Every structure is written in structure tokens, then in C-alpha cells.
């Protein structure tokens, strides 16, 4: 029995970047190398640009890649295994998308201007840059998100804050009016109210709980007896829970915000690509 267990191979999780021992990285590097060699060895004066046979070849390849890469949203709705699994498709999406920087740059012949052709190129760079940012945050943040949650869901974090609010409300009843007002202001704060920019920062410079803690120290409520001390301890726990919730929302926002650039920029790129192709053939 022990020998069978020892003979069983240990399966290590393989991410989409390492899929099939970096198969699509090798394909993308090979494609980029072929494009560079073809461009360097092409016998054309001046150097090959978009209007040469090399330019049309690289442009066609780049356009086909862009259209295929944009289909990943459709592919996610289908579940298959094997060679064209979603993991494999995502790996190809990443590495072939990066190879566009080489293929399309060579297609332009390093000729840029204030026109729809350069607009399409700029949008492509924006799409690739936002995708690289997305890969970076997915490589780092899920572990940080899991560590911060400590096996708690967002709903459980909110419930913990509400439970503390009930305890704080009861404990604050013996306090004087000024101290009680500070506590009530803190309890009325909505942790989900800050906008996207503040959520991405993970901080709230106008946190009413922090203001209540500072105010209670200023009013002398802590020195006034056990009621004030208990309220302060509960408010400190509330602040710790709020900090955790804010970090949780920040990590989630970072995991999602890049899509608000990547997807619209992809749609704009496809539109600019169509305008680029139509204008090229119209003036051909």
C-alpha cells in the first residue's frame, strides 16, 4: 500500500502561463523570430512598410490574430478539455497577444502619423498593456486576497461589523451627549460609499470611526469610566474590521478594474482595425 502511494505521481498545479511547458510562449517566440528575420532579409528599398508585400503579409497575420484573440470571451462560455481547453486558449491569448507587438510594429515599417492607422496601433498597445496589468494582478492578488479574508466571506465581514455596531450602540448609552454623537456618527458610516478611486486606494481619510476614536480621547470619555473604555475597545475592533474590508474591496477592484479598460479598448481596436483595412483597400 505504501509502495503504491509512493509510486503515485504528485500533480502540481499548472497555471495558464506555464501550460504544456510554455508551449504557446515558444510558438509566440517562434512567430516573432520568423517575422523579424523575414523583415530583415526582405530585399526592398526603402525598408518594407505597410504598402509592400511584406507589409500586407504581416498586416494580414496581425489582423487575423486580433480577431481570433477577441473571441476569448466567446470561448469562455464553452467548456472543453484537451488541446483546446480554456487554460490552453488563455495561454495562447496571452503569448500570441504579446507577439502582436512585434508583428504589427514590423507591419507599420516604423511609420507613424496622425491617422487611423496609428490610432489602431495605439489602441493595440493599450489593449496589450492593460492585459499585462491584468496578468500581473492575477499573479499576485489572489493570495493576498485569501490571506486578508482569513476564511471569511465579504458578507461575513459585513455581519461582523454590524454585530460590533450593536455592541457599540449599547455600550455608548451611558456616555455624555458629545461623546455619544461621535459614536453615532461612526455607526452611521457606510463602508461601501467611497467611489472607485478611494476603493482602489484601500483607505478613507474621512473615516468616522477614526474620528470617533480621536474625539473620544479629546472629550475625556475614556477617563470617565469603564463605559468609555469599553466603547473605545469596540471602536478599535470596528476599525480593524473596516481596514480588512477596505483591503478586500481594494483587491477585488484591482482584479476587475483592468477589464474596464481592456474590453472597451478591444472593441475600439476592432473598429479602428476595420477602418484601417477599408481605407487601405479603398486607396490601394
Image: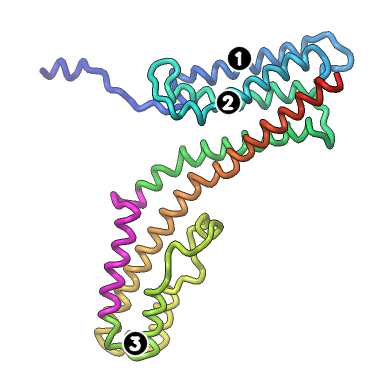
Q: Residue at x 70, y 17 (%)?
A: 60
- The first of marks 3 and 1 along the sequence is 1
Gap between marks 1 and 2 measured at Cα: 18 Å
Residue at the far right: name it: 45
Regarding mark 3 in the picture, which secondary structure is present there? loop
| Quadrant location, the N terminus | top left
Instruction: Work out whether residue 239 or residue 274 is closer to the camera in this orientation and state it.
Output: 274
Q: Give the distance between the C-alpha atoms of the residues marked 2 and 3, in whole angstroms.
A: 62 Å
Question: Which residue was labeled with disc 3?
Answer: 221
User: Mark 2 Cα within 10 Å, few/some/many (few <14, many 20+)?
Assistant: some
Stretch of the chain drawn in magenta: 147-170
Image coordinates for residue 73, horizontal then vertical, percent: 51, 31
Which residue lies at the image location 81% right of the left edge and 26% below the top edge? Answer: 279
Secondary structure character of the magenta stretch overall: helix
Towards the viewer: 64 or 186: 64
User: From the viewer's perspective, is residue 104 above or below residue 128?
Assistant: above
> For the residues marked 3 and 1, what is the alpha-carbon distance in whole angstroms?
71 Å
Q: Which residue is mark 1?
A: 30
User: Which image quarter: residue 211?
Assistant: bottom left
Marks 2 and 3, the one that precedes in the sequence? 2
- Between disc 1 and disc 2, the foreground one is 2
Image height of 157 relative to 141, above or below? below
Instruction: Locate residue 194, reporting x and y percent.
Output: 50, 63
SS at mark 1 in the image:
helix
Does the magenta-highlighted stretch encompass residue 28? no
* Residue at x-position 44% and y-position 29%: 77
Q: Residue 54's image quarter?
A: top right
Q: Is residue 37 left or right of residue 87?
A: right
Query: Which residue is the site of mark 2?
Result: 69
How is this picture coloured?
Answer: rainbow
Amino acid at each position: 500500500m505504501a509502495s503504491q502511494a509512493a509510486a503515485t505521481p504528485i500533480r502540481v498545479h499548472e497555471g495558464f502561463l506555464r501550460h504544456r511547458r510554455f508551449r504557446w510562449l515558444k510558438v509566440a517566440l517562434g512567430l516573432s523570430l520568423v517575422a523579424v528575420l523575414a523583415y530583415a532579409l526582405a530585399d526592398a528599398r526603402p525598408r518594407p512598410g505597410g504598402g509592400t508585400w511584406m507589409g500586407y503579409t504581416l498586416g494580414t497575420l496581425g489582423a487575423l490574430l486580433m480577431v481570433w484573440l477577441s473571441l476569448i470571451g466567446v470561448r469562455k462560455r464553452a467548456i472543453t478539455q484537451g488541446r483546446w481547453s480554456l487554460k490552453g486558449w488563455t495561454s495562447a491569448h496571452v503569448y500570441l497577444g504579446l507577439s502582436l507587438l512585434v508583428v504589427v510594429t514590423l507591419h507599420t515599417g516604423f511609420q507613424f502619423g496622425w491617422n487611423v492607422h496609428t490610432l489602431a496601433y495605439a489602441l493595440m498597445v493599450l489593449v496589450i498593456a492593460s492585459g499585462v496589468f491584468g496578468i500581473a494582478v492575477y499573479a499576485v492578488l489572489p493570495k493576498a486576497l485569501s490571506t486578508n479574508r482569513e476564511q471569511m466571506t465579504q458578507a461575513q465581514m459585513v455581519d461582523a461589523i454590524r454585530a460590533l455596531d450593536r455592541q457599540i450602540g449599547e455600550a455608548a448609552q451611558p456616555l455624555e451627549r458629545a461623546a455619544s454623537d461621535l459614536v453615532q456618527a461612526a455607526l452611521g458610516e457606510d463602508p461601501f460609499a467611497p467611489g472607485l478611486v478611494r476603493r482602489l486606494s484601500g483607505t478613507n481619510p474621512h473615516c468616522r470611526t477614526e474620528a470617533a476614536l480621536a474625539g473620544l480621547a479629546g472629550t475625556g470619555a475614556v477617563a470617565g469610566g469603564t463605559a468609555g473604555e469599553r466603547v473605545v475597545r469596540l471602536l478599535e475592533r470596528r476599525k480593524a474590521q473596516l481596514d480588512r474590508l477596505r483591503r478586500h474591496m481594494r483587491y477585488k477592484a484591482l482584479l476587475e478594474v483592468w477589464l474596464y479598460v481592456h474590453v472597451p479598448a478591444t472593441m475600439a481596436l476592432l473598429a479602428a482595425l476595420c477602418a484601417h483595412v477599408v481605407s487601405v483597400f479603398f486607396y490601394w
